[in-house]
Image (spheres, rainbow, N blue to C red):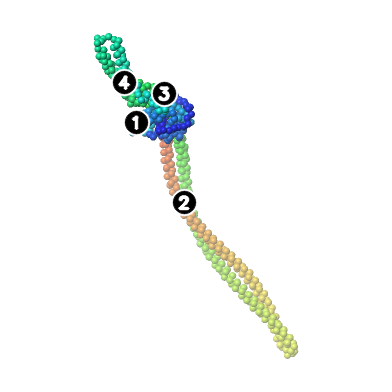
Amino acid sequence: MECMGVRINIPVTGTEKPLAKDANILSTTDCKGRIRYVNPEFTELAGYTSEELVGEPHNIIRHPDMPPEAFNMLWSALRQGKSWKGIVKNRCKNGDHYWVDAFAMPIIKEGKASEFQSVRVHPESADVERARALYEQLKKGRIPWFIRWRTLSLKLRCFLVAVMAGIAGSALGHSAFDGHPLLVEGTAILFLGAGILWIFRPVDEVLKKARSISNDRVAMHIYTGRQDEAGQLMLAMKMLESETRGVVGRLADDARQLRSSNSVLVEETRGTACCIGELNEKTDAVASAISRMSSSIQEVSGHTASTAEVAAAVSHEVEDSRDRFEQSMAAVESLAEEISQASAVTAELMKESGTISSIIDVIRAIAEQTNLLALNAAIEAARAGESGRGFSVVADEVRTLANRTSVSTEEISQMIERFQANTQTVARHMGSARDKAEQGLEQSRNANQSIHSILVAMNNITGMTSQVAAAVEQQSGVADGINTSVSSVMAITRGIARSAESCQQRCDEVSQLSQRLNELATQFWEKRP
């Protein structure tokens, strides 16, 4: 667990970070050594955050002073499904270091390892000193003798002691078999050997079991300082103690997480209960509002139906008004046409009066010429004397007639001028009337178009009002459905509120249970060897 593969983490400060006596440093990795979980004590001691550690290889905390052989034994044991125990020197993020008594074990699921767990506690100072000395030799490439060879077994040492005791007794004692000392010694040694084998048979079984638990000579030396049967038994006991401690440590950490999670759950449950209470109040308010809305929709439906009837009546009135206005517009068009014709006649009359003026001018000229001729005739008649007297009378009459013609012509000319002036005035008035008639006709057309637009709009309003009435009727049905659904939601939220209250009670029970579990785990943890 402490390392997988070769990795040199630098720098190092040489400063040892003290470890609390009751420390419980826990981590888990996947089968490739990548960190899955670290507890708060781990991050606090190592100086990393959990985000910096999770997903990283566990050798991120490896100290350069640790020999690779230690981790080779670790991973060899874990891959065989066995536990491993050792004193480990780890590196902090800032380069400091700390010593731990580490116990790593595989977590088996469905017959195969699913992850590896490591629990680290405060190490004994004697164990640390033996580990430090051993790791220095291994880093220098020196393999201590106790790793290569075992010391004499207790059974062999007892046998040798018995042999030496037998030899000493034979040399000092007296017997009937003095003539056969070798026979006496051999028989004694044989019986002693058989007795020793018989005595150590149960011990051999215990030792066999102990070796099946751990046969790590390095760990035996570090934790016991021995390489004999006693060291083997002591190592096995320490392995079992560590395994129990690992289970209790994991249990304590899980209890801590359970207590923390349960505290959050209790708070969230209380918050949920409050939210559900507010939801009940809001749902009641919504139900009341929907009920009022349903009444309002029904009232609006009645008003909309009345509005549709009024709109239909107004549309009919507008249709009648349009018909009457079209009749008026036809009359205005006829009047405009007559005014236009009268204006044309007036213009023609002015033209003819101009012709009359020209004729009068001719008559005036003729009268003046006649008057002049009559004057000449009178002069000639006076010259003729008596013979010209009758001609003179005629000339006077002609001159008188010419003067009268001239006067009449002047009067006619004045009358024509007045007639022309009046005709021009009439023409102007007729033109103005024609323009106003055309303007009125255009305005009538625009008004007719507006009335047509109003009629179309009223028809649209009538149609839309009918649609609105139908939609309001549908909304009334939908509102009734919503009201029913809200009533169901209210019933459901009340059920949820009861469930939340029950859940809160269960959370309180779980909280008490997690507290007792934590106290129990703490008790076992504090009583660990």
* Front one among 299 and 520: 520
Task: Identify the residue at horizontal 44%, vertical 24% (top origin).
Answer: 21
- Nearer the camera: disc 2 or disc 4: 4
Indicate the quadrant containing the N terminus: top left, top right, bottom left or bottom right: top left
Q: Nearer the viewer, mark 2 or mark 1?
A: 1
- Return the x and y of residue 54 as percentages of the image width and height: 43, 34
Is residue 501 something one can see in this rendering?
no
Seen in the picture, residue 423 relative to 490 is either above or below; the reply is below
* Residue behind mark 2: 468
The Cα atoms of the two marked residues, 2 and 1, are separated by 80 Å
Q: Type of residue at label 4?
A: Val
Which residue is painted at 74% across and 89% down in the image? 384
The image shows residue 376, relative to residue 188, as above or below, that is below
Q: Position of residue 266 (x, y in %)?
A: 44, 32
Q: Looking at the image, is mark 2 or mark 4 earlier in the sequence?
A: 4
Tell me if residue 141 can be seen.
yes
Q: Out of 367 and 177, give the one closest to the viewer.
A: 177
What amino acid does circle 1 point to?
Gln
Mark 3 or 4: the one toward you: 3
Q: Which mark is residue 130?
A: 3
Name the residue rendered at 26%, 17% in the picture.
Answer: 190
Q: Residue furthest front?
A: 179
The numbered dot on residue 80 is: 1
Q: How far, Cα to Cα, is label 1 from label 4?
A: 26 Å
The picture quadrant where one finds residue 112 is: top left
- Mark 3 lies on a secondary structure that is helix
Q: Where in the figure is residue 513, as x and y percent of width and height?
A: 41, 28
